[in-house]
Image (cartoon, helix red, strand yellow):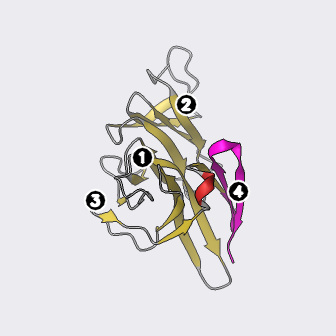
Amino acid sequence: TFHSAKVGSVSFSSSDHNPLIASASDDGIVAIHDARLNGTSGVSSEVVAKIEGSHFKPHSAVWKPDSDRVFATAGLDEIIKIWDLRNTVRPFALFHGHVPSSGKKIKRIHRPAFLSLHNAYTAKSFILSGGEGSHAISMFNLDNVVKDNALNSVFSRGKLPPDVGDIGSVATHESHIAVAVEGGEILMLSRK
C-alpha cells in the first residue's frame, strides 16, 4: 500500500492515452498514480508525483474534466489548491472565500468540483465548493486566476435554504449541479 491512512478521494484523469489516478489521504499526502505502470509489492499502479503537506488531512483530489494535467485538492482547511502536473512543487492557484453564516472563520472546504460552461462563442471554467457552516455554494473563476500563490476570492456565491445544513459534496454535468446536504438530501440546481 502507498498511503498509511484513510484515502478520502480517488479520481481518474480524462486522458485516454495516459490514465492517471489522483488520491488524497489523511496521511497528508496527495499522490498521482500511473495506472499503466505496475508498482512494486503487488501495488497496481506506480506513484509518479507525491505532494506532501499541501493540506491538513487532504480529502479531495479531482481532475479538471477537459485536462490531463490540471487537478484540484482540498482538505480540512480553508483553501482549494489548483495544480499542474508538470510542476507539483507548488500550486498555480489558491482559492479561499467561504464565509459561514455565523460569521466565524471557516474550518474546511467541502469536496470541490469543476464546472465548464460552453456556448457557441465562449468557454468558461469554474470550481464549485461548499464550506463548513456556509450554507452556500461558492463559485471560483478559473479563467482569471491570480497566480504566484496569491489567494483568489469567490467569483459568485449561491445561498441555499437555511434548513438544508452544510454541503457535503458537489457533482456537475454540463450546466447541472447536484449538491449533497446534511440529512441525506440531494439538491438539483440548474443555471438560469
What residue is disc 2 on? 37
Q: Is 55 drawn above or below residue 122 in the view shown?
A: above
Lower position in the chain sequence, tag 3 or tag 2: 2
Lower position in the chain sequence, tag 2 or tag 4: 2
Inter-mark Cα distance, 2 to 1: 34 Å
Taking the magenta stretch, the answer to whether it contains residue 173 is yes
Q: Within 10 angstroms of label 1, few (less than 14), some, or many (20 or more) residues?
A: some
Prevailing SS of the magenta stretch: strand
> What is the magenta range?
172-192
Lower position in the chain sequence, tag 3 or tag 4: 3
Inter-mark Cα distance, 2 to 4: 39 Å
For the C terminus, which image quadrant? bottom right
Inter-mark Cα distance, 3 to 2: 32 Å
Lower position in the chain sequence, tag 4 or tag 1: 1
Kindly identify the amino acid type of the residue bearing the numbered disc 1.
Arg
| Viewer-side residue, 39 vs 173 | 173
Q: Is residue 145 left or right of residue 148?
A: right
Where residue 6 sits in the image (x, y, percent)? Answer: 50, 25
| Viewer-side residue, 160 vs 130 | 160
Inter-mark Cα distance, 3 to 4: 33 Å
**Labels 2, 1: front one:** 1
Instruction: State the SS at label 1.
Output: loop
